Amino acid sequence: MDIVTVTRFRRARSRADLALMPGEAYIAGGTWLMSEPQPETTGFVDLTTMGWPSIEPTADGLRIGATCTIADLVAWAASDAVPDGWAATALISPAANALLASFKIWNTATVGGNICQSFAAAGLMSFAVALDGMALIWTPDGGERTVPVAELMTGNGANALARGEVLRAIDLPDHALRSRARLRKIALAELGRSGAVVTGRIDPDGSATFAVTAATWRPTVLTFDSLPDAATLAAAIGDAPGYYTDPLGAADWRRGVSIVLGERIREELAS
Ligand SMILES: Cc1cc2nc3c(=O)[nH]c(=O)nc-3n(C[C@H](O)[C@H](O)[C@H](O)COP(=O)(O)OP(=O)(O)OC[C@H]3O[C@@H](n4cnc5c(N)ncnc54)[C@H](O)[C@@H]3O)c2cc1C
């Protein structure tokens, strides 16, 4: 749609260009920003011209640039470029497909935009939380800070980024990338926005991590020394805070299906 309040558009090419003027907002893929009126916004600062690499294997794991498109991430995960042993990259396709997104959105929407929009049903949030993702944030004073992606989101559509802070990248650790991992999603409509997404993984050291997203206001991460039994996992998921009701599902339904999805993942990981 036409965003009639916007009269300025700047392409950021350096860190100095990221300083926001009054009324300006960052734009990445623009798929959310251009989908509804932005009455407070009078200018966009384009992040896609910063030239950040989309995918960078590092000494500690994988860095995904915030401006990497969802389509590019999915294509990389299906390519020969994935290092041997990074089995958990198999989560990328189901996480991207957990997004209610048309072909056009996938090719334009960015990983960083999906996380910074911070909807409970953010599929790439589910992916990053599942694998202990750390958000690298550039601060307006020229510094940087890191925060677990699971703690970045503070509510459905809200996050802990201060004005002028930019999500630069998501870092995923090697041990999580080497895990056996699963993702299950459910929605009231077959291709609808996620009502609940549950992920689970077993690391090479035998420890297990489960996460509930979409069903709760903010991600819930549950860690265990080893794969829990069914009752332990069901109780942990059932006790998670923040199950909510909206037109996409009632709170008690979200809690119930999260327990079922968690148990399906647990059984698969046990086999
Ligand atoms: C038809 C349709 C279906 C959708 N389905 C879903 C869905 O199922 N789940 C879901 O979560 N979303 C959904 N969305 C919303 C949105 O399209 C996605 O979240 C998308 O991934 C946003 O990415 P983007 O790059 O287009 O972000 P943009 O629209 O460019 O930006 C979104 C927000 O994030 C901020 N931002 C972007 N990048 C950064 C950064 N690096 N640092 C700091 N701030 C940043 C922007 O300022 C803006 O506030 C849907 C949208 C449409 C139109």
Image (spheres, rainbow, N blue to C red):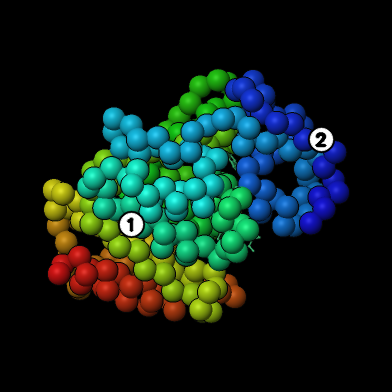
| Tag 1: amino acid | Ala
Q: In which image quadrant can residue 165 be found?
A: top right
The reply, left or right, for residue 184 in relation to residue 103 is left
Instruction: Specify the quadrant that holds the N terminus.
Output: bottom right
In percent of width and height, residue 43 lies at: 78, 37
Sequence order check: which comes first, mark 1 or mark 2?
Answer: 2
Instruction: Specify the quadrant that holds the C terminus.
Output: bottom left
Crowding at dot 1, Cα within 10 Å, few <14 / some 14-19 / many 20+, comes out as some
**Residue shown at the point (85%, 38%) measured from the top left:** 7
Judging depth in this view, the residue of 179 and 197 nearest the camera is 179
Identify the secondary structure beneath mark 2. Answer: strand
**Residue shown at the point (33%, 57%) measured from the top left:** 90
Gap between marks 1 and 2 measured at Cα: 40 Å
In percent of width and height, residue 101 lies at: 57, 63
The reply, left or right, for residue 151 in relation to residue 103 is left
- Residue annotated with mark 2: 8
Report the disc number at residue 170. none
Q: Is 145 drawn above or below residue 28 in the view shown?
A: above
Identify the secondary structure beneath mark 1. Answer: helix
Q: In which image quadrant can residue 162 be found?
A: top right
Whether residues under marks 1 and 2 lie with C-beta atoms below 8 angstroms apart, the answer is no
| Tag 2: amino acid | Arg
- Count of numbered marks: 2
In percent of width and height, residue 64 lies at: 44, 40
- Residue annotated with mark 1: 90
Q: Is residue 209 visible?
A: no
Q: Is residue 257 visible?
A: yes
